[in-house]
Image: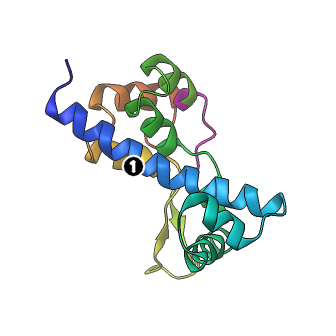
Amino acid sequence: MLTIEDELARVYAVGELNRVDLLRTVSQARDKGLTQTQIANRLSISQPEVHRILRKVHNFPDLLVLNPREIILRFHAGRISHEEMMNQLIGWPYTYARAAEPANPESVMIPGTWDQLADAVYRDLLSARDYEHLVAASGTARRGA
């Protein structure tokens, strides 16, 4: 039986994955030649909403790229096992936070994919034990994280 915390994580994960699936599917439909109106009709949304989705994908193409956050969400949504999640995360080619403007000591930091793990721990989507296992497996000892 799921705890309420597990159920909350599952509901959150399913919602976030549905959002990513929507972005990917609308983008793929456009790439296959469907018009915005055809896509809208099939999804029962408005054509302006399809336009907004396509503009978002155009402006932020990384939203369509698989990342550690999505892998963790897939686990909570029941799409992959804990073992599959950990195996994918252990083998991930992580990036680390860096300054947006390296010459500026007060620059805003651009997060890396490793930061998604820390965020998942904060949101109770990744246990501290799993995080420590990933730290040990990465051999970085939180390099820059």
Q: Quadrant of residue 131?
A: top left
Mark 1: amino acid: Gly
Whether residue 145 is visible: no
Q: In the structure shown, which secondary structural element does the residue marked by tag 1 occupy?
A: helix
Residue lying at 54% horizontally and 27% vertically, measured from the top left:
90
Whether residue 34 is visible: yes
- The part of the chain drawn in magenta is 89-95
Residue lying at 64% horizontally and 54% vertically, measured from the top left:
24
Residue lying at 49% horizontally and 61% vertically, measured from the top left:
111
Q: In which quarter of the image is residue 56?
A: bottom right
Q: Where is residue 116 in the image (x, y as percent from the top left)?
A: 44, 49
What residue is shown with label 1?
15
Q: Where is residue 69 in the image (x, y as percent from the top left)?
A: 47, 45
Q: Which of 67 and 81 is in front in this view?
A: 81
Left or right relative to 45: residue 123: left
Left or right relative to 111: residue 40: right
In the image, is residue 11 above or below residue 33?
above
Q: Where is residue 141 in the image (x, y as percent from the top left)?
A: 44, 36
